[in-house]
Image: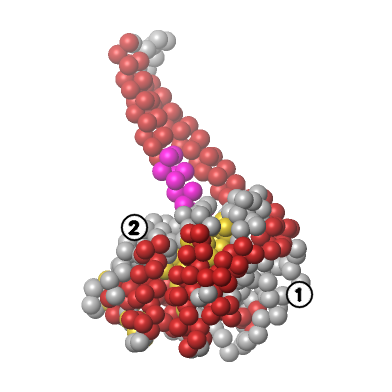
Amino acid sequence: MQYNSQPSPLLTTNMEKALATFSASTATAILLLASTLYIQGVEGSIGVNYGTLANNLPPPAQVAHFLLESTIINRVRLFDASTEILRAFAHTGIEVTVTVTNDQIPHLTNIGFAQEWLKSNVQPHVRTTNIVRILVGNEVISTANKLLIASLVPAMQTLHTALVGASLDSRIKISSPHSLGILSSSSPPSGGKFRQGYDTHVLKPLLSFLRATNSPFMINPYPFFGSSPETLDYALFRPGSGVFDENTKLSYTNMLDAQLDAVFSAMKLLGFSDIEIVISETGWPSLGDSSQVGVDAESAAQYNRNLMQHVTSGAGTPLMPNRTFETYIFALFNEDLKPGPTCERNFGLFLPDMTPMYDIGILRSTVAAASKFHHATYISVLTIGLLIISNNGDNMLC
């Protein structure tokens, strides 16, 4: 077989077209791949709960520097409004959510107290620390404290008035996290309902406030606490038969989706399906009591890794498709002073020396390694494509 030393003009044109077509398609593929990597890297979507009920934690300044320089986490939720921690996060750009503790809620219904709380805990830091949200209490309805529950929405409204007075209402939003205990029914997901009495007297005015202020409804779903030996795979996002909702004819492949959709259904029943849902807490312990199932580092890593991939994938849930969820993993560290069973002290992602309890892909080195892999894949695909074009050209030169 003889090969011409110079390709004909027609052949050159065909090769250029093929190369251009391949390059365009490859560029498109790489852009899609980059966007997928961005989603899987969860930059901007995954936050962490920074609890401090421990006697062995590193200084806040060290924590802030670690999160900024070594992880892809750029949102932090605090359970108070610690001055030391807020100063530590100054100039980092990390979004910070602070909390008014439950015991302060009744006082917060007074405008003078609300203004003073704002002046003491938030305003000194707004120029340097990226405070984006104030949470009024935590799981207030689950406390069954009548005074706290009755004061919740008025406290949120009064604090918002104080924010307006300080010209901070467009920058800082107000909400309040809830446990799944606010539901009287959660199965099937389409039949989710808020507890009677609380639905119209507390949650309806709370949701009205959130809509008026463009703030999210915040929920603390924990598949861990809803799991059993029979539903462990379902709770950990493992493949399985899942759950079928007879009302909607929709299938559920994981417990988190079912929990979120139960909350969505309850909101929809009150006419508030338009309000964004934020996962303010969820996680899985790496250690627990012998009577508990699936309490180990492997299960914790699997849950949190699958959680991150799922909530940032854009898949959404069966009733809320094609969307992502702002999510805060519980928790940054193990907290050795927390009361309750062993698992309560072992939800942490990191040890006090910043060593990961397990790998879920939030360290920047992990993202960098993934990026290098995709870059190498691109080069390999491009090389193969050029060889294919070259071989096709060689055949045309016969």
Residue 186: quadrant of the picture: bottom left
Q: Is residue 29 left or right of residue 363?
A: left
Q: Secondary structure at mark 2?
A: loop
Q: Nearer the viewer, residue 3 or 270?
A: 270
Name the main secondary structure of what is drawn in magenta: helix
Position in image of residue 144 (x %, y %): 48, 88
Q: What amino acid type is highlighted by mark number 2? A: Asn
Residue found at x 42% / y 64%? 216
Position in image of residue 276 (x %, y %): 38, 63
Q: Secondary structure at mark 1?
A: loop
The residue to which callout 2 is attached is: 322
For residue 1: magenta? no
Q: Is residue 367 left or right of residue 164?
A: right
Q: Residue 300: tell me if it is visible.
A: no
Colouring of the image:
secondary structure
Q: Which part of the image, by quadrant, shows the C terminus?
A: top left
Q: What amino acid type is highlighted by mark number 1? A: Asn
Q: Is residue 110 left or right of residue 24?
A: right
Question: The magenta stretch spans which residues?
Answer: 30-41
Q: Which part of the image, by quadrant, shows the N terminus?
A: top left
Q: How many marks?
A: 2
Position in image of residue 218 (x %, y %): 45, 69
Q: Residues within 10 Å of mark 1 (few under 14, many from 20)?
A: few
Q: Is 23 drawn above or below residue 214 in the view shown?
A: above
Marks 1 and 2 in Cβ contact (< 8 Å): no
Q: Residues within 10 Å of mark 2 (few under 14, many from 20)?
A: few
Q: Nearer the viewer, residue 22 or 53?
A: 53
Q: Nearer the viewer, residue 24 or 84?
A: 84
The residue to which callout 1 is attached is: 55
Q: Is 340 drawn above or below residue 329 in the view shown?
A: below
| Mark 1 and mark 2: Cα distance apart in space | 42 Å
| Residue extending furthest toward the front | 112
